[in-house]
Amino acid sequence: MPSPALTTGAVAEGMDRALWSRLAGADLLSLLLAGEHGGAGLDAIALCLVLREAGRVLARVPLLEHSAAAAAVQAFGGPGPADRLLARAGRGELVFTVAAQGRTGHDPAEQAVTARREGPGWLLDGVQTAVPWAYDADLVVVPAHVEGAAGDRAVLALVPREAAGLVLAEQVSTSGERLAELRLRSVRVGSGEVIEAEGAWEWLHGLLVTGTCALALGLGEQVLRMTGEYTGKREQFGYPIATFQAVAVQAADRYIDLRAMEATLWQAAWRITSGAPGPLPVAGDLAVAKIWAAEGVRRVVQTAQHLHGGFGADTDYPLHRYHAWAKHLELALGPAAAYEERLGDLLAAHPLA
């Protein structure tokens, strides 16, 4: 696999199909699916445990997007789409992805696409940017807004990648992975391919945010482990640099970041899973987790680069790949600033006693 630092395009045309097959064989693509669809019937916490390990090894598969989309179809799509799609999705024969970035990553993704009824189906128009694994997916879950007298509401459209009027324009992430700008020009989908249930998009988005935090945590933990091993062996003045106070303090600060990332991740995953009430809506816990994940993983890889010296930029050493993936995860689904705004709005609307 070429280094993202040494290529102007994507590092590969598609995902790691061999790994995808192994995940399917281990039943890890169906964790959230019920038994009647061949799944384990587990929850967001279980998915995040697996995603944490995927982040450690920079797994090049749409495990998060696929699992979250399948879970949303199961929870909100009704028996028709569920019976038709989920068993195949659990076996890895059908691949989902989600267009969740919107136009900028900062604005609500559902506002980037409009959906309107026409005849027995729907027409979709708009643009979604930075869609992961779009060239590998069979179905893209596209959030869209429907204008009405009572105000806009969000729906989820299950759009085949080969649908007429759907155009993919290649984009490349900082990680070197192939993304796509998704352009929808009067794309027609049937009424059975649109999930209209209230709260479906908010729930799916929350699961995607939580899973992104889990990927960032696993990546950060692996980077800190690599840094500890390197500084324990690298000597200056006859001593390992890990024994120097300045090095130890920086590593300790990043360990604190990781523990904060972990605590806020599990709080968000638990709120999604349990539905338990809290002083703020679940969106508040999601915002806190994403703020910590975005800022924490950035600090972890920056410190790791610093403590590795020039060796950290060596393209024969894996640290530069982790740095590139960390930047992608930091900005995925919106930067920390977007979630700080949302958290401020929630605090204003729900004053804490």
Image (cartoon, helix red, strand yellow):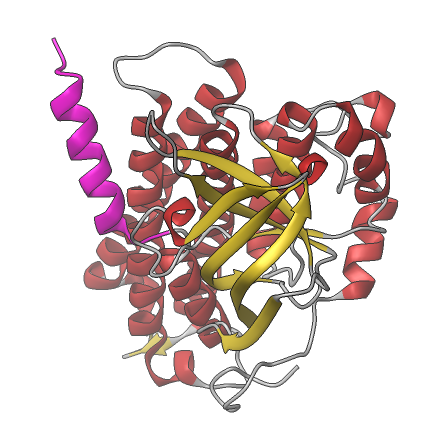
Range shown magenta: 334-353
The quarter of the image holding the N terminus is: bottom right
Note whether residue 177 is visible: no
Q: Is residue 129 above or below residue 92?
A: below
The image quadrant of residue 32 is: top right
Residue drawn at point x = 73 percent, y = 64 percent = 162
Note whether residue 183 is visible: yes
Q: Position of residue 173 (x, y in %)?
A: 47, 72
Q: Nearer the viewer, residue 279 or 221?
A: 279
Q: Judge left or right: residue 223 versus residue 65.
A: left
Q: Position of residue 101 (x, y in %)?
A: 43, 55
Q: Is residue 259 above or below residue 321?
A: above
The image quadrant of residue 257 is: top left
Q: Nearer the viewer, residue 319 or 325?
A: 325
| Residue 342 on the magenta segment | yes
Q: Judge left or right: residue 42 versus residue 108.
A: right
Q: Judge left or right: residue 102 versus residue 81.
A: left
Q: Is residue 296 above or below residue 152?
A: below
Q: Position of residue 180 (x, y in %)?
A: 54, 69
Q: Nearer the viewer, residue 57 or 170?
A: 170
| Residue 280 on the magenta segment | no
Residue drawn at point x = 26 percent, y = 63 percent = 247
Residue drawn at point x = 23 percent, y = 37 percent = 342
